Image: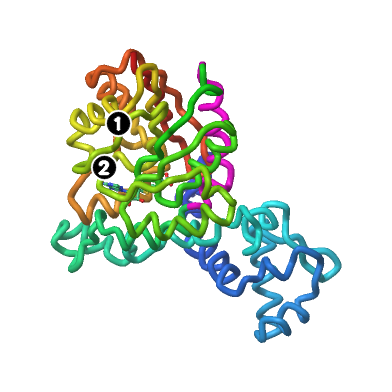
């Protein structure tokens, strides 16, 4: 008899990868049907199907799938949300991240079906490469992307910033490329004497306004519509914060960091919260979602670890403290630079 194959290596990780689309399909279906809204308390599959007007037996099967994915618990034939689903997947929860999760498949930003052609033929293969500078794209993103800040990151970043020497005396800060502006809200919460300026393009700020007002923060926030690459940033800030936005200035970092340096008061802080690639641009896994956009635009817009800190020192900042922070979407770099 011929010898049979034997291996001590399990292909479980590969099977898990292959099951990814199936798992995402169940999650997306549940979000589309707002199933988690119905399951804060135990409910039978018949009552879920009745409320959703869906097929009772296949609804039960879908609920079983969601239980396998550990989003629901099943007991004596009825289902309810796990704490994870109850916190993040119920649409009226303040920490709802449904739009953030479905955004990973946003056909404008990540057209998964374009991957084959992009790899085979290059950037030209995609007929309408998105314009990442288009303000309507980012205005639409305001709602989807606020979830990652409300879901825990905003509080952790603001707490870290609040620990900086003299933070309690800071009066004015700017959130540059603020998008939804939720980081600014967490900073305001840390210092009741501080007010914030939100800078982004006009349409994005208009989209952010209702969110700011829903937290009753309008009295402490002002808006500065504009393009931070070409427009004046203003003067007299004690802190300038920029999260996930400097990618648009990559290649013009010396110019950008000099502008930021000038806009700060003496002793002021510049805080950047950004990607920071290591391991020959293959870590952290946060950046997997950026690969297709990079292919489409033929542009490597993610930062290497240390790139922002180096630019800050070149621009005249006295010193920079850098740390890698774990976030639910992967590791990010927090660089804190101080003006002399
Ligand atoms: C990925 S979002 C980040 C939003 C938010 N800071 C966060 O971390 O969730 C990038 C933001 O930068 C803004 N942006 C990009 N280039 C800009 C520019 N030149 N001037 C002003 N805002 C810009 C976009 O409009 C968008 O809101």
Residue wearing tag 1: 304
Q: Is residue 147 visible?
A: yes
Quarter placement of the C terminus: top left
Q: CA distance from mark 2 to mark 1?
A: 22 Å
Lateral position of residue 189 relative to residue 252, left or right:
right
Q: Is mark 1 within 8 Å of ligand 1?
A: no
Q: Provide the residue designation for mark 2.
A: 228
Tell me what residue is drawn at x 34 percent, y 46 percent. Answer: 224
Q: How is the image coloured?
A: rainbow
Main SS type for the magenta part? helix
36 drawn magenta: no
Question: Does residue 272 appear left or right of residue 65 in this picture?
Answer: left
In the rendering, at what x and y percent does residue 274 appear?
A: 38, 36
Q: Are marks 2 and 1 in contact (CB under 8 Å)?
A: no
Hey, which quadrant is residue 49 in on the image? bottom right
- Is the residue 260 above or below the residue 226 in the image? above
Left or right: residue 79 versus residue 272 is right
Q: Earlier in the sequence, mark 2 or mark 1?
A: 2
Q: Which residues are magenta?
A: 146-165
Q: What residue do we see at 67% from left, 52% from top?
A: 84
């Amino acid at each position: 008899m011929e010898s049979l194959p034997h291996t001590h290596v399990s292909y479980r990780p590969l099977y898990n990868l292959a099951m990814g689309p199936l798992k995402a399909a169940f999650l997306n279906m549940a979000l589309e049907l707002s199933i988690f809204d119905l399951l804060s308390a135990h409910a039978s599959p018949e009552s879920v199907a009745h409320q959703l007007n869906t097929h009772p037996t296949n609804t039960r099967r879908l609920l079983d799938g969601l239980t396998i994915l550990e989003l629901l618990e099943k007991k004596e034939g009825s289902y309810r949300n796990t704490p994870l689903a109850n916190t993040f997947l119920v649409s009226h929860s303040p920490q709802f991240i449904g739009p953030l999760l479905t955004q990973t498949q946003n056909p404008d930003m990540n057209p998964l079906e374009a991957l084959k052609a992009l790899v085979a033929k290059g950037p030209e293969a995609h007929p309408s490469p998105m314009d990442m500078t288009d303000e309507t794209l980012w205005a639409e993103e305001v709602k989807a992307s606020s979830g990652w800040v409300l879901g825990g990151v905003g509080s952790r970043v603001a707490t870290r910033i609040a620990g900086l020497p003299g933070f309690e005396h800071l009066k004015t800060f700017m959130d540059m490329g603020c998008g939804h502006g939720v980081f600014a809200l967490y900073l305001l919460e840390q210092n009741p004497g501080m007010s914030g300026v939100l800078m982004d393009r006009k349409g994005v700020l208009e989209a952010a306004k209702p969110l700011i007002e829903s937290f009753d923060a309008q009295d402490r926030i002002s808006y500065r519509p504009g393009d931070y690459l070409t427009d004046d940033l203003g003067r007299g800030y004690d802190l300038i914060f920029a999260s996930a936005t400097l990618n648009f200035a990559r290649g013009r970092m010396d110019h950008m960091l000099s502008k930021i340096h000038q806009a700060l008061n003496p002793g002021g802080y510049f805080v950047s919260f950004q990607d920071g690639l290591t391991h020959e641009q293959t870590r952290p896994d946060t950046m997997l979602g950026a690969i297709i956009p990079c292919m489409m635009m033929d542009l490597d817009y993610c930062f290497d670890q240390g790139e922002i800190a180096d630019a800050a020192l070149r621009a005249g900042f006295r010193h920079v403290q850098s740390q890698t922070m774990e976030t639910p979407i992967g590791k990010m770099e927090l660089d804190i630079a101080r003006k002399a």
